[in-house]
Image: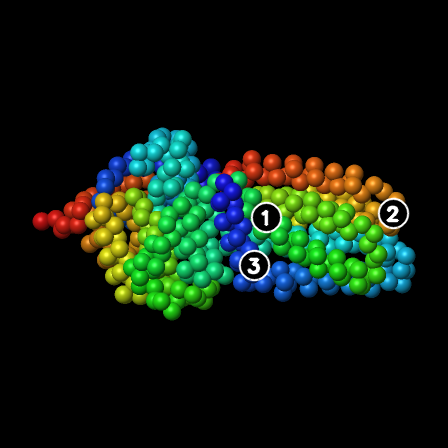
Amino acid sequence: MLRDAWLVAAKDLQIEWRSRVTFSQVVPFAGLVLVLFGFALDANRPVLLQATSGLFWVTIMFVSTLAVQRSTSIETTDGARRALLLAGVEPPAVFVGKSIAVAVQLFAVEIVLLAGVVVLYSADVEAWGLVFATCLVATVGIAAAGTLLGALVAGVRARETVLPILLLPVLAPVLIGATRAFDDALGSVAVDGWSWLGLLAGFGVINVVLGALSYGVLLEET
Amino acid sequence: MLGRFPALAGADLEVGESEIVLVQGPNGAGKSTLLRVCAGLLRIESGRAEVLGHDLVTDRAAVRRSVGLLGHDTALYDDLTVEENLRFWARASRIDDEAVPAALDRLGVADRLRDVAVRNLSAGQRRRTALAAVVVRRPRLWLLDEPHSGLDQGGRDLIDQVILDAASAGATVMLASHELDRTLDLATRHLTVAGGTITSDERGSREPGGHDAA
């Protein structure tokens, strides 16, 4: 299974490398959202700093809908989903492979966005370890939930609009947990960020297991 | 099922090795559905069927691994090159990707096109590439849905030859087509599908194995 998962992940990343969708469209979009939030709250600098964690993760939620939509359309545009079944690739391997590719892209965007937050908002990071651990664990959960829901809406005609409606509520625990963990890492609110990381890990495990178990049914039926 | 209505009913069929079966019928008759059922992509709601010795209800995964399907979609990734696409599908099917260049040669995909992204191919070049992916799999059952669509005369002749060679090598070929002028001569058997049922099943002018009937 790992061989197939890697094959699918490498293929999706190669497609991204060729098309440059993440770096030519998604990263600029994320940067614009950060700048616009900055314009909206810059008059009240303490509020901007206090809201930095939430703004970062809200931006990542928007970015994740784009990344998942792109990942889904790679397989649906020309019937590749069915070809994967015919090739005999195990559905859990497709799920894991596509999740890895989405996670890598999201993580790259997060790194760029983190630099943007530090430069644009003058955020002062007190615990880099917690920041990177939060990004890593939250990204796994987002990618797994996104890939699963992407497959769920793959057969829906209006999937571009349906996906965010389904995905954003599902990602609410990530938004809450990752924002709290970042609050701790940025020193903006006195909370225990590591315990919020536990919530994120739980969310990630649930979605990875759920995806691995149900992706085959979704691939067959949608 | 299409909504509450069966997409295909009353399909009673036995096909042997080296046969080339032409499936003909009007649009929406159930030709593509029949091919997709044989590929194990659609679940049968009632009755029983075996493809290459594998049960279509309980062992669809084994059926899928043994067939090669060329559908309306080409299942090619636009941002990968022709060769990258074929190598990906070969590896995904656990087939040695060394067979890729020979398959592209066989389908007349020129050397200069192999490093071109699929999004830059014409419809005919895309079709040839998709059929090359089927050739790489060397399936025992070929399921071809309108294989000549979008091809020039040379491409059509080439595909006919690929089909004949596959049948000569012992594979079974089922092709759905509206191009009766071309495919009637090719087939060893003609099925007519209408309203989701097989309404006629006749022998063709060619004998299985490649010899024309006397």
Q: Earlier in the sequence, mark 3 or mark 2?
A: 3
* Image height of B5 relative to A163, above or below: above
Q: Numbered disc 1: what chain?
A: A
Q: How many marks?
A: 3
Disc 2: which chain?
A
One can see residue B25 in this view: no
> Whole-Å distance between the Cαs marked 3 and 2?
37 Å
* Amino acid residing under circle 2: Val
Q: Find disc 1 in the rendering and name its residue.
A: A100
Residue contact between numbered discs 3 and 2, judged by CB atoms under 8 Å:
no
> Along the polypeptide, which appears first: circle 1 or circle 3?
3
Q: Do labels 3 and 2 share a chain?
A: yes
Question: What residue is rendered at 63% in x and 65% in y?
Answer: A24
Type of amino acid at the residue the image marks with label 3: Glu
| Residue where numbered disc 2 is placed | A189
Q: How far apart are marks 2 and 1 (CA)?
A: 32 Å
Chain ID at mark 3? A
Q: Which amino acid does label 1 sit on?
A: Ile
Q: Label 3: how many residues lie within 10 Å, few (<14), some (14-19) or many (20+)? A: many
| Marks 2 and 1 on same chain | yes
